Image (cartoon, rainbow, N blue to C red):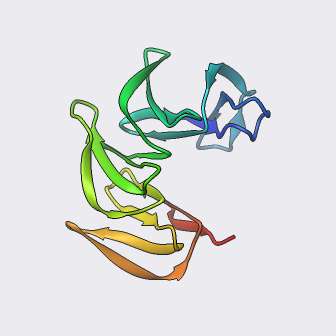
Amino acid sequence: SMFTVFLPPGHANSAEYIYYRQLACPGGITLSNWAYRGPQKLKTVAVGSAGVWAVDPSDNIYYRHNNIWVKYPGLLKDISVGKVNIWGANKHDDIFVRQLSSGWFQISGKLKQVSVSNNGNIWGVNSGDNIYRRNGNTWQHIGGKLKVVAVGNSGVWGVNS
């Protein structure tokens, strides 16, 4: 099957333009060249079954639809995409979730960064670098400290500095 990998802005160049490349699996990884997908400047991008979503340097939210970036209402500093839900956090660390066909709904708690997997696991970290996992309708504190957390089919990963 074919996967698309998005490179976070700043990793390909200093202009914050977005690039992508495809890789083929199984039977070994075959990577294509990076392809330019600008000129929209973005600070973060997230990919999941619910599509490709991004946030620009002013915290505006975009959804990639028919090869065009469509601006969505709201402001987020961080965004994550799962199977049907899109999660994010704003500059006040307020947490929001939506589906493609609905508006943003605020979730209780405060997180500076949130990650959702295609199977619905949701993890995040707050401004004190404390780690949380969504358990039903509540946040469960997990021991340790992380700056960033990522959850997916390969488990939960984090960066602590």
- Looking at this view, name the residue that lies furthest to the front: 92
- Looking at this view, name the residue that lies furthest to the bottom: 143
- Vertical side of 144 occupied by 124: above or below: above
- Percent x, y of residue 124: 44, 64
Residue 138 placement: quadrant: bottom left
The residue that appears at 42% across and 80% down in the rendered structure is 142
Residue 18 placement: quadrant: top right
Q: Is residue 16 left or right of residue 152?
A: right
The residue that appears at 41% across and 64% down in the rendered structure is 123
Q: Is residue 5 visible?
A: yes
Q: Nearer the viewer, residue 77 or 36?
A: 77
- Percent x, y of residue 154: 51, 61
The residue that appears at 57% across and 72% down in the rendered structure is 146
Q: Is residue 1 visible?
A: no
Q: How many marks?
A: 0
Q: Is residue 142 left or right of residue 106?
A: right
- Percent x, y of residue 28: 68, 44
- Vertical side of 48 occupied by 39: above or below: above
Q: Is residue 138 left or right of residue 60?
A: left
- Percent x, y of residue 27: 64, 43
Q: Nearer the viewer, residue 113 or 30?
A: 113
Q: Nearer the viewer, residue 161 or 92?
A: 92
Q: Nearer the viewer, residue 57 or 53?
A: 57
The residue that appears at 32% across and 77% down in the rendered structure is 140
Name the quarter where the C terminus is drawn: bottom right
